[in-house]
Amino acid sequence: MRRQVPLIITLIVGAVLIIAAFIPHHPFGRLGENFSLYFDIIAVFAFLLGGGNLVRIHGARFLRGVRTSVQEAKKGGGFWPLKFLVEFPFFAFGGLEDKRGRDWFFSLITLAGFFAMLYAGLFKIGNPDGWQGNVTQPGGLFQEFYQSMFNPLQATMYALLAFFVASASYRAFRAKTLEATILLATAFIILLGRTPAGTYATDWLPSWLDFFHIPNLANWIMAVPNLAGQRAIMIGISLGVIAMSLRVILGVERTYLGADEK
Amino acid sequence: MANGERPTFLERVQAIDRRIIFLFVALAVSLPLVFHVIFPEKISPIVSSMFDRIESLPEGSRVLISFDYSPSTVPEVQPMVDAVVRHCAARKQKLYLMALWATGQNITDETIHRVIEKEFPEYRYGEDYLNLGYKSGNQGLINVILTDMKKMYTTDVHGTAIDSIPMMAQIRNLRNFDIIFTFGGGFPGTKEWVLFAGDPGKIPVASGVTAVQAPLLYPYYPSQLLGLMGGIKGAAEYEYELIRRYPRFANVAHPGIDMMGPQAVAHLVIMLFIVIGNIAYFAGRRREAKRQGTP
């Protein structure tokens, strides 16, 4: 019964949404919209599940890390709390042999951050308009956390990408084969075409060779070969999604329910 | 390198420490910013189609802007948003702001404070612009508001009843908007707006996304997507056109144009490294072939 009920719900919801998409007339037309409203309710529970899962995973990791660190400190005798304090950075940041217990301090930071934001947002601490006001109003604790911590941390993470992209392209872009050479040439045209350098480099070309202006070439690559490739990928993905959806609706695919039980 | 031979210069170049590359990239990005290197831009057709649509809309047209991004992509996406908001406000259009991403609500507030309140003090909340805030539901939300906006939005972001807001009097669903702008770089984003609103509702959708996301959205242009701004380049093109047509915006911040300098130099540095890496690779291969006695 535990498996039959979710399968029946999936079958009904899937079938109704297909009917709603193909028969846009009353009363079927509105069914998709009504189911979307339920999706909104489910999304709220997904937030709770997501938060709960984060606490569960990082909580377990933190506890396991502390336990392993204490065991390490106790090894060799002596006054272990002092040893724990002295070797704290080693225990906290990747110094443990047991991989599952490593880097537990980051889990602690994650949990502290999560609960601090939750507390500030849920109770609207310092919000100028109190409980009735918007949680993002300037002056509130939530907004302070957002502006001073979340915002710069996310921006830093994204900015670091530029450095890794540069390093990775240096090592990966080698003209080893014909295909790699074509890829390399295309990358050069796009890189140049996305900067004014591309314009300056081919500005001297006569107008009848307009196509070979690097910005025009870059646009052509995006609008023709890229478009063809993207469309092929999208059609492939869509066919895959249709096949998988049918399998889920018909109950052939059951992995989303968890491990198969006999 | 074999038999304990010392590595040649080119072999050492091939195995260059990534921190050296990082240093060069850091210099390539920071020096143009310090010396304020700026290049002229020319608007491309994919950006100008969006710009021209805003120009052609009559005064008081309803523009929906969805903030579907997080602070990580703010440097790339925010210049586009600011330019479009300025453009719409200069054309006296009504702005409806919303977010499909939870982080988008904060960014919406910041945009209102920085652009609308500061540069357009004559704009009145509830009459000229409205903040609908964030709602969960992703594409499900779009699906619902395509036919009934008030089913999902009973209040604005400040808790004011939607029926008491003058701007919402004429709005029943997404079809009542003259254009939808979606800014972001992930899920839910442009693709979902096209699939669940633009295409079924025959509503013009325009978008501004990160440079990484742009190639994935080309299949929708020009039939389902009115126009597309990709990365800083797209933002710079829009800002340049805005300044050209509205010279009064020449003195406001234009981060898109400012960041094209660092982007141009960084691209050149990366290309230079790739060329050096290839020279070193081929030289190494030749040396290896010579050592083994093969031509």
Image (tube, helix red, strand yellow):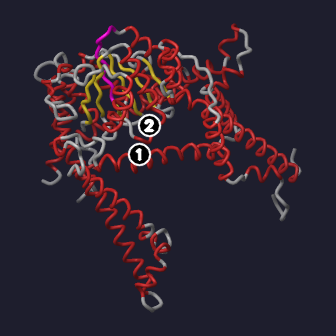
CA–CA distance in space, label 1 to label 2: 9 Å
Q: Chain of mark 1?
A: A
Quarter of the view holding residue A2: bottom left
Q: Which residue is mark 2?
A: B74
Cβ–Cβ below 8 Å for labels 1 and 2?
A: yes
Q: Furthest-left residue in view?
A: A27
* Horizontal and vertical percent position of residue B187: 36, 36
Disc assigned to residue B239: none
Residue wearing tag 1: A151
Region in magenta: B58-66
In this orientation, does residue B109 appear? yes
Residue B102 placement (x, y as % from top left): 30, 40
Q: Is residue B1 above or below residue B51?
A: below
Q: Is residue A73 above or below residue B129?
A: below
In the rendered image, residues at marks 1 and 2 fall on the same chain: no
Q: Position of residue A246 (x, y in %)?
A: 27, 36
- The residue type indicated by label 2 comes to Val
Instruction: Give the amino acid type for the residue marked by disc 1 in the picture.
Output: Asn
Query: Disc 1 on helix, strand or loop?
Result: helix
